[in-house]
Amino acid sequence: MRIVITGGAGFVGSHLCDRCLAEGHEVVAVDNLITGSPDNIAHIQSPQFSFRRQNISEGIFIDGPVDFILHFASPASPVDYLELPIQTLKVGAMGTHNALGLARAKGAGLLLASTSEVYGDPHVHPQHEEYWGNVNPIGPRGCYDEAKRFAEAIVMAYHRMHGIDTKIVRIFNTYGPRMRLRDGRIVPNFVRQALEGEALTVYGDGSQTRSFCFVTDLVDGIYRLMMSDEHLPTNVGNPLEFTVLEFAELVRKMTQSESPIIFQPLPQDDPKQRKPDISKAQRVLGWEPKVGIEEGLAQTLDYFSSRLKPNS
């Protein structure tokens, strides 16, 4: 297939480029580099790969045939979408609309990268796909949560009205190489702080929970969903649940850091619990995560250590 990956120079998008190329597909990566980086795709030398710098909120232009679109363009960390709320809303709305327009024009399928944030601060635990969520639409996180909820709605509208072969993956916390050092999410925050000898910053009392999926496991789930006949949202994540404080202690142990842990006020609308119910992915895709937390963290630590070296 000839596959277009929006956000292809981002953390997850670049790993998807690798997987699709390894499966023998041609890949066109599209990114405006607002949060992505050319470094993430600099290693790709395949003649089957090309890169287009485009802002898909303004339009997406691909010549020639397109068989499938993996729509991953969006700021995806709290630091990003709190600094870029309008761009986040635009790419969720106009960017998704443009990607669907390309899919319709080319007769292509489309997979939307949605998020566990559509569940908001959930009243249901673990979160399953039939749960409609508890989202504050006008809070500081609403720009991301509602952009993704709108994106899911328009994807399903195009599927029902125009018969486009669409898929929706709801991604839970993911980590691994190519995350930015100052991404703002828990894993890069704790790892960078520990490696640089800074205090690890825990928000609230640290009792809130998160579940962490290694990026190669996530990409495998996404690829399986792309190749499946499933159209309704599907959770992909690791159901192994940690409190934030437990995870901070694990990072300190693995980095052999003596950094203290300090506590800061909990941000508004920060979810208290986050754990995916992956029974649908297991049943429909035959998928479940394989990479253990210590194995995945070791690879992530190696990557971050190399990025923190002077002049690296």
Image (cartoon, rainbow, N blue to C red):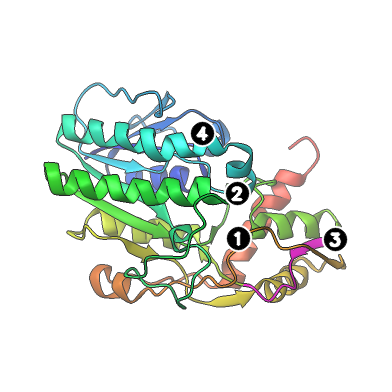
Q: Earlier in the sequence, mark 4 or mark 2?
A: 4
Q: Find out whether residue 205 is within the magenta segment.
A: yes
Q: Amino acid at mark 4?
A: Gln
- Kindly report which numbered mark, 4 or 1, lies closer to the viewer in this rendering: 1
- Left or right, residue 133 beside residue 197: left
- Left or right, residue 170 beside residue 35: left
Q: Earlier in the sequence, mark 3 or mark 2?
A: 2
Rendered image: mark on residue 269: 1
Can residue 41 be seen by looking at this rendering? no
Rendered image: mark on residue 199: 3
Q: Find out whether residue 50 is within the magenta segment.
A: no
| Label 2 neighbour load within 10 Å: few <14, some 14-19, many 20+ | some
* Residues rendered magenta in the picture: 200-208
Label 3 element class = loop
- Kindly report which numbered mark, 3 or 2, lies closer to the viewer in this rendering: 2
What distance separates the C-alpha of mark 4 from that of mark 2? 14 Å
Residue 39 pos. (x, y %):
57, 35
Q: Earlier in the sequence, mark 3 or mark 1?
A: 3
What distance separates the C-alpha of mark 3 from that of mark 2? 26 Å
Rendered image: mark on residue 87: 4
* Above/below status of 211 relative to 96: below
Q: Earlier in the sequence, mark 4 or mark 1?
A: 4
